[in-house]
Image (cartoon, grey):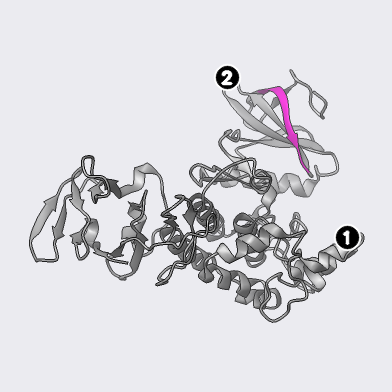
Amino acid sequence: MSGMLDSGDTLTTGTGETLLVDRLLGSGGQGEVYRVTLPDGSAKALKWYYPESATPQQRQVVEDLVARDFDDERFLWPTAFVDAAPDRFGYLMDVRPDRFRGLPELFRRTVTTTFRELLTACLYTVEAYQALHSRGIAYRDISWGNIFFDPATGDVLVCDNDNAVVEGDRSGISGTMGFMAPELVRGDPGAMPGTQSDLHSLSVLLFMFLVNHHPFKGARELAIRCLDEHAERRLYGRDPLFVFDPDDADNRPDPVEHTTVRALWPLVPVSLQRLFTQNFTKGLREPSARVRESQWRDALRAARDAVVECPNCGRQNMTEPGAATPGTCWKDGTPLVLPPRLVVTTPPPRTERHIMLGRAARIHRHHLTAEPTRHDYSDGSLVAELVEHPQKPGRYGLANRSAEVWTGTRSDGTSQRIGPGQTVPLRSGLALELADGARAEVRAR
């Protein structure tokens, strides 16, 4: 093992536990990560800082993060401080499960996923950072290198949390070039990393999730002969220009070099395109105009609920929520057909949720709440799902997967009770009384 630590080395945490170094897992800009074994035989990951990064300032940041005891499974949070000398230290965190993959694998197409799971990952990412911000903590280094996602579920995991600090704290780094807010790249007077600059970084990350490309890398970047620090500061700070800026086409993606972003951008629902455009035009000049987490959350949820499958090839397509014409399939050009939709009305403050009832449609607990604290698309939050009749192919019903009894009212006025595990035939006009005062109605397109 070639690293700062050797296999078999022992270290001690701030609480007196002895760690046994197993092997090197990887390295980054600030240090190396090792797999270590605790006295009870369990495994943890240890981040060990390079000497030039092991500053008194960084030491204080890590000690403060450990003391904060932030308990959220979406973050590999520092759980214990490990100290060998004033300039030799690190921290423990949980080991990243193998199911979580990095964005570079998505860009290289070495992992397969779907639009639903990508939108889920984007939504979960927004809510993860929103949870941090709600506690008065700025992450300050949101980038594609610090987020991992499960292609099968959309679950996300935020790593490298040792740069997060209390809002207003000037210690630590300002971010990763390419994700930093323009005012930080330029070094504007009074500009400092915080939740406002995090909103810019978050938008860049979401753009890369959905179109696999940086929002400022177009014709201008191709014209740069040497992409050194001076050129990067111009590209991201002094003269940033969105590749799809509606008023300036000077930085459009190249037809040969940028085929992926040119192909994927038209597939993004217009409601999301508008938010990206707002952030990468007005938001570049006015930090207060940047899209808030709540705006991203609502738009991403609506977009996920509006995904439909192609009637010919079965591929998932993103459609604009509420649109009357869904367009054509991105894969084979077949005209898309809008399925019936379930319109859920939440208890006060009343809000409508429109869920397309195509194949694999599922309704979750958060659909029944006007302001959910967190979205959850796992089986544990399932309320209802679309199922096909076992003896009559092509006939569908809505299965009650909750623990509550529903009351259903047909279009002719007759009613029925739908208990847990029972299914009600899917017919236009069907009205349902669900849990906690939520109501739903099946509408034909």
Can I make out residue 121 in this image? yes
Outermost residue toward the right?
Answer: 225
Q: Which residue is mark 1?
A: 229
Q: How far apart are the alpha carbons under marks 1 and 2?
A: 46 Å
Corner quadrant of residue 412: bottom left
> Where in the figure is residue 151, as x and y percent of width and height?
54, 43
Task: Residue type at mark 1: give it.
Answer: Glu
Task: Residue type at mark 2: give it.
Answer: Gly
Outermost residue toward the bottom?
Answer: 247
Q: Is residue 158 left or right of residue 2?
A: left
Q: Residue placed at 70% from the left, 64% from the top? A: 215
As helix, strand or loop, the secondary structure at mark 1 comes to helix
Q: Which residue is mark 2?
A: 41
Where is the N terminus found, in terms of image quarters? top right
Is residue 100 inside the magenta stretch?
no
How packed mark 1 is, by other alpha carbons closer than 10 Å (few <14, some 14-19, many 20 or more), is: few
Q: Residue placed at 70% from the left, 59% from the top? A: 259
Q: Which segment is the magenta one?
A: 19-28
Where is the C terminus found, in terms of image quarters? bottom left
